[in-house]
Amino acid sequence: MRLLEFQAKELFREYGINLLPSKASTTIEQGRIHAKELGYPFVIKIQVPVGGRGKAGGIQKCQNDDEFELKYPQVLALTIKGEKARAILLEKMADIKKELYLSIFLNRSKRCYTIIASSEGGVEIESVKNQIIKEIGMGDVKEEIAREVAKEMGLDGKTANDFVDTLKKLSKLTIEKEAELVEINPLAIMQDDSLMALDGKFVTDDNSNFRHPEMDKYQEKSEIEERAEKSGFSLVELDGDIAVVGNGAGLVMSTLDMLSDNGGKPACFLDVGGGATTESVYEALTLISQMKKIKGILVNLYGGIVKTTVVAEAFLKAYENGIIDLPVFSRLKGTESEKAKEMLKDSRTKIFDSVEEAINAAVMGIKN
Amino acid sequence: MTEIFDILKGKPEDSDYKKKGVIVQGITGAYGSLHARNMMDYGTNVVAGVTPGKGGQKFDGKVPIYNTVKEAVDATGAKISIVYVPAKFFLGAAKDALEAGIKLLVAIPEHVPVRDTLEIIEMAKQKDAIIIGPNTPGIMIPDLIKVGIMPPTPFTEGKIAVLSKSGTLLYEISDALTQAGFGQSITIGVGGDPVNGTRMIDAFDMVKDIPDLEGMVVVGEIGGDSEEILAQRIIDSGFKKPIVAYIAGRAAPKEKRMGHAGAIVMGTYGSAESKVSMFNKANIPVAKRPAEVPVLLAGKMEKSV
């Protein structure tokens, strides 16, 4: 899970990383109170769990009440890369000399944590020049390593000391919270040569959530996502009109790809897990019935040892109980598929031998 | 013969040649017991189970259960263990196995915290052990030994190595290969987590020198850069046998985790385009659909003859 900027900054503050005064709100009434407390000038920043906020107009300078009344509602109403504003952060304007880049991330191919730092920050990581990259094992940054990085960045005096301090705190935060990525970009050098974290990005390892109940408050899940999780499903909601259900993440991704190649628009990615049973498929259909805009369901199950008749039962039960009233296009690999087809011949579920046929039928069926 | 075959199959002079013992950790759980039976049905020599607190009992009246892996290893001499415990208990179970001298540890559980995986990888390095997974379907030599959860039907003995991040795609594609007459010499589930005990390149190194290997199939997916690194290794190694790849997740949105913890594109890092272009650079065709894999492989084979 990716935290919002103000949530990442809450953690930064807890670990003693330098920050400008800031306040998060969800309504303009709250915002007005914060504006008074902070005093002008400040920056209005949209809180969304994606990058590219600045380019999309989600970060606005604000000098006075008139500007505030105009810009706060504008920023709050923005949608960036499909993400609506979760909150608005008002943050004091900074008088800065230079922007640096600093992050610690889980290096998947090296299988260890790694520092990336640069004296040329403030742009997206892909564009950060002169990157200094250091592998740091399980994430612990020792004083001498931090000094080395500061030196390579050309920092000295108070700035270098502040940098070493910031990097050590950042590594403590990364280890203790089991983060996949913690990034400060920009890390600004102020007029007095001190350092200040102007932005914060924090991605958790969700698999370690059970060890971090203190992070529960940052969890953001829709009702449908929560139900999916309870059933042990993985669900990603998408923009299209054909729900895609299957067993195994790879197989469902593959089905999504083939559907898109054929002009279909997936409405969701729903992985019911490695096995497939009457219950799991029935629960998946129940979940899908609660999504909007769906015109059909594409099911791709590789059963191996699963009897397709067992899955066919789930479809019949779902129609019988009025859970779904949608056409289902299904490819079921497993035994007894002839019998399953017979069971479903009078229903709105069609069984196909190959996933390609099921996809073609789904795309055609939805159009008509 | 490479090391992985020594462990899974053994050498003709071994007294347990082609019937290497396997320990099942978590054998009394619902999942562990189901798959222990499936493995035995497949012909895998399950010699012991481990469930703390249940030592002294027998599984299905025949497989002795021990409280620790150490006891199981002392009694059986097994070098292979498969772990079916819930993710929270994986770290303890895996340490138990490595300390007992297990040389091949197959880590089935999904949702293992990355920090635990890192710790186990570090320990495995010191103990000179191989970790497969976590979040893997396992490893198998078709028609000889299955240490995993894969259904038996898709696989048949042969000369193609299949490496896959995904479980069900491994079954799907092996099934298509089998139908097309391409049996498999070994299949390795690398796993769907961001950090894998055996990476794609490690798996490649394990299988590339199999003497009668005729080709390789790589089933990747979005996230990370293990496919790119593998492609570079293939170029550098001068490996000449036919390889075909498949990459799942071309249509997935960015910054969304697609089921697997590791299946996430950050910016351009982990994108399908990046992987496909590296495979193209290595002259490895990338199938658009699972069903296309055997077709491309047959094409490659014809050219290489």
Image: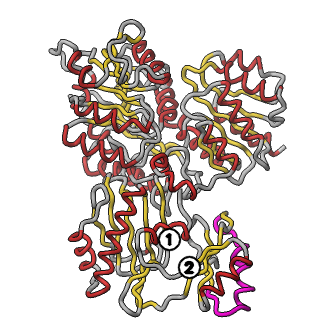
Please report the bounds of the magenta region as a residue range: A61-81
Residue hosting label 1: A9
The three-letter code of the residue at mark 2 reads Ser
Query: In whole angstroms, how far apart are the C-alphas of marks 2 and 1?
Result: 9 Å
The answer to the question of whether label 2 and label 1 lie on touching residues, with beta carbons closer than 8 A, is: yes
**Of the image marks 2 and 1, the number of the one nearer the N terminus:** 1
The three-letter code of the residue at mark 1 reads Lys
Indicate the secondary structure of the residue bearing disc 2: strand
| Residue B217 appearing in the image | no
Q: Is residue A175 left or right of residue A279?
A: left
Indicate the secondary structure of the residue bearing disc 1: helix
Q: Is residue A50 left or right of residue A170?
A: right
User: How far from the left and from the top, in percent, is residue A82?
Assistant: 67, 63
User: How far from the left and from the top, in percent, is residue A187?
Assistant: 42, 79
> Where A133 falls versus A60 (above or below)?
above
> Where B117 falls versus A332 (above or below)?
below
Front position in the image: B60 or A357: B60
x 28%, y 30%: residue = B97
Chain containing mark 1: A
User: How far from the left and from the top, in percent, is residue B269?
Assistant: 45, 60
How crowded is the residue under tag 2: few (<14 C-alpha within 10 Å), some, or many (20+)?
A: some
* Residue A319 belongs to magenta span: no
How crowded is the residue under tag 1: few (<14 C-alpha within 10 Å), some, or many (20+)?
A: many
* Residue A66 belongs to magenta span: yes
Q: Give the quarter of the image for residue A71.
A: bottom right
Residue hosting label 2: A22
